[in-house]
Image (spheres, rainbow, N blue to C red):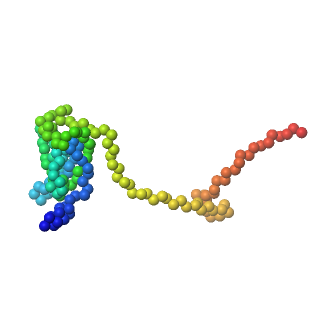
Amino acid sequence: MDAVIEKYDSEQLKMEIPEFAVGDTIRVSTKIVEGEKERIQVLQGTVIARKGSGLSETFSIHRISYGEGMERVFYLHSPRIVGIEVIKKGDVRQAKLYYLRGKRGKAAKVKEKIGVKKKKTPKEPTETPVIEPIQTETATDVTASATEVQTPIEKTAPVTEAAPSEE
């Protein structure tokens, strides 16, 4: 029975979730259904907790707007979550940041991690252009226009004139 549940859970897991931890500032885009209409709502805030594992993993976002603090808990693998974007990495030493709940202003700030290298997405290998030799036409072809005629540039040694000898 456990194998059936694990198989179902593994099918439901999202694979495109970015790496983020407690203290990071992230932007979560969620799908909101109002009647028959759907829209996407974006919430940006600091991750104050991350709990659970597997399909039931959750994370809490804390944000202060108009002087009031608000929190929202999301299921990480929810089909309502359209995307998660990491804005900045936070430098914290605790697993849960519940102390941010009563703070405002500068006291509610989390230091940014300095020297964090952002992962570069691998670019597709570009093909090297094939260089073909230039087709040159002879100057005897009268029907060719001046733009079509390409003559190779010949490099010659500079001509040095000998001084006239006085004999």
Image-based side of 106 in relation to 113, left or right? left
Q: Residue furthest right?
A: 167
Q: Which corner quadrant holds the N terminus?
A: bottom left
Residue 160 or 74: which is nearer the viewer? 74
Above or below 99: residue 133:
below
Q: Which corner quadrant holds the C terminus?
A: top right
Image-based side of 32 in relation to 116, left or right? left
Residue 30 or 23: which is nearer the viewer? 23
The image quarter in which residue 116 lies: top left
Indicate the position of residue 13 as horizontal and vertical percent values.
20, 59
Indicate the position of residue 14 as horizontal and vertical percent values.
22, 58
The image quarter in which residue 61 lies: top left
Above or below 161: residue 17:
below
The residue shown at (23%, 43%) is: 24
Q: Disc count in the image?
A: 0
Evaluate whether residue 131 shows in this view: yes
The residue shown at (28%, 39%) is: 113
Q: Residue furthest top?
A: 106
Q: Residue furthest front?
A: 2
Residue 161 or 144: which is nearer the viewer? 161
Indicate the position of residue 93 as horizontal and vertical percent values.
22, 39
The residue shown at (66%, 60%) is: 139
Residue 155 or 7: which is nearer the viewer? 7
Indicate the position of residue 108 as horizontal and vertical percent values.
18, 35
Image-based side of 86 in relation to 142, left or right? left
Evaluate whether residue 80 shows in this view: no
The residue shown at (62%, 64%) is: 143
